[in-house]
Amino acid sequence: PRNSSCRSSSSWRGHQQRTRAIADLDEAIRLDPTKSVAYTNRGHAWNEKGEYEKAIADLDEALRRKPDYAQAIEGRVKARRALRARE
């Protein structure tokens, strides 16, 4: 029982950190919407939260700005695979 509550607590902490990261990246994008890295990082955070459609939208935007950005490509592949697996 103790281990499961520790895992639960850890999972919740991770969720809170991703939510905070997304908020920080929202602000970074608002301040400079030309930065593909901010879209990529927010896309990765959405992936970790299981919000794959949002991840793909951000990663597509990153790739629109920087078509050869490997981290964005990898994140988009991960999100698309997760969506297919969900179907």
Image (cartoon, helix red, strand yellow):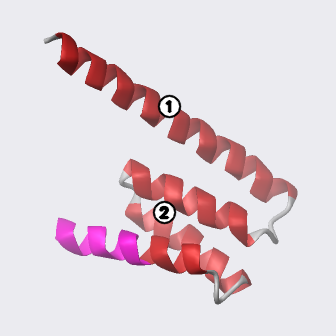
Q: Residue at x 19, y 20 (%)?
A: 4
Segment tinted magenta in the rendering = 77-87
The residue at the far left in this view is: 1
| Tag in front: 2 or 1 | 1
Q: Secondary structure at mark 1?
A: helix
Q: Which residue is mark 2?
A: 54
- Main secondary structure along the magenta-highlighted residues: helix
Identify the amino acid type marked 1: Gln
Query: Can you give x and y, in whole percent of width and height, for residue 76 in the image?
Result: 46, 75
Left/right placement of residue 42 relative to residue 13 reads right
Q: Which residue is mark 1?
A: 16
Q: Residue at x 64, y 81 (%)?
A: 69
In the image, is residue 20 part of the stretch drawn in magenta? no
Q: Residue at x 38, y 69 (%)?
A: 79
Q: Quadrant of the N terminus?
A: top left
Label whose residue precedes the other's in the sequence (2 or 1) = 1
Q: Secondary structure at mark 2?
A: helix
